[in-house]
Image (tube, rainbow, N blue to C red):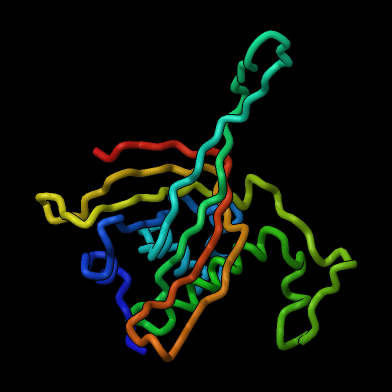
């Protein structure tokens, strides 16, 4: 199968409909990864890619909803009162094919490592393969969840149109900043020999605490 350069693919309007293109960018490292000496090199490279902005085959802006309540009324329609703003999780399909064969596995490994660091085996050395080919049992104390503030990050989802700015950069239509982001689901990577020109994409679902919409300058 051909290797795709995500940057070239992102800028090539022939591959994108007028509905737009997406870019997902981490704005800061999660606290648990800020000490680079404890992070494996493939994970560091994956985070560098995400912090520079990674092309997304599909990216969704968060759905917003106001939670309301309405006191019982016996002489007319109920009036709804808003008391909270809530957001739905977002789905992103990362393009994982590049000029280097390691690009796909680094991104997948980096996101997987992020999840393992959130709620995986506490003692990595004890359960590292191939020293111990077994896996920790779920009824032991090998698994433990990290502190929330240590594993969340901030990110930006940008949607671009098919046209270019006068300076030659892609035209950004809308931008949403996400606060306290982390991946809750990493989907299957679909491959096929039947469609040689279809890029490999990695579907990831992110949850977050709050979203703020900004209009690009």
Q: Say left or right for 125 vs 54.
A: right
Q: Nearer the viewer, residue 208 or 68?
A: 68
Above or below — where is 72 with respect to 24?
above
Identify the residue at horizontal 47%, vertical 50% (top origin): 28
Above or below — where is 114 with respect to 126? above
Name which quarter of the figure residue 69 lies in. Answer: top right
Q: Which residue occupies the foreground of this view, 105 or 72?
A: 72
Q: Is residue 129 above or below residue 177?
A: below
Residue 138, quarter of the rendered image: bottom right
Do we see residue 38 in this rendering? Answer: no
Question: What x and y, as percent, mark residue 93?
Answer: 45, 65
Tell which of 75 and 193 is nearer to you. Answer: 75
Q: Is residue 69 above or below residue 202?
A: above
Quadrant in the picture for residue 10:
bottom left
- Residue at image position (73%, 75%) is 125
How many discs appear?
Answer: 0
Q: Position of residue 176 (x, y in %)?
A: 41, 43
Q: Give x and y (percent) for residue 25.
A: 40, 54
* Residue 122 shows up from this direction: yes
Which residue is depicted at the point 26% across and 48% down? Answer: 172
Question: In the rendered view, does 98 fall on the left or right side of 163?
Answer: right
Q: Residue furthest left?
A: 166
Q: Residue furthest front?
A: 75
The residue at the point 41 percent across, 90 percent down is: 194
From the viewer's side, name the closer residue of 79 and 86. Answer: 79
Location of the N terminus by quadrant is bottom left
Residue that protrudes farthest toward the right in the picture: 139
Q: What quarter of the picture does the C terminus occupy?
A: top left
Residue 67 in the image, given as x and y percentages of width and height: 62, 30
């Amino acid at each position: 199968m051909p290797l795709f350069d995500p940057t070239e693919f992102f800028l090539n309007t022939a591959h994108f409909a007028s509905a737009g293109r997406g870019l997902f960018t981490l704005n800061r490292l999660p606290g648990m990864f800020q000490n680079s000496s404890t992070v494996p090199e493939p994970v560091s490279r994956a985070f560098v890619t995400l912090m520079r902005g990674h092309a997304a085959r599909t990216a969704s802006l968060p759905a917003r909803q106001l939670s309301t309540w309405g006191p019982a009324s016996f002489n007319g329609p109920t009036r709804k009162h808003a008391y909270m703003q809530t957001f739905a999780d977002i789905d992103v399909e990362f393009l994982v094919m590049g000029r280097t064969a390691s690009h796909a596995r680094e991104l997948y490994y980096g996101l997987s490592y992020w999840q393992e660091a959130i709620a995986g085996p506490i003692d990595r050395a004890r359960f590292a393969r191939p020293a111990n080919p077994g896996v920790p049992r779920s009824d032991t104390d090998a698994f433990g969840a990290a502190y929330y503030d240590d594993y969340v990050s901030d990110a930006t989802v940008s949607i671009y149109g098919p046209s270019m700015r006068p300076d030659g950069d892609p035209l950004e239509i809308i931008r949403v900043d996400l606060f306290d982001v982390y991946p809750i689901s990493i989907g299957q990577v679909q491959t096929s020999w039947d469609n040689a020109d279809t890029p490999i994409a990695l579907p990831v679902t992110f949850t977050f605490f709050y979203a703020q919409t900004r209009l690009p300058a």
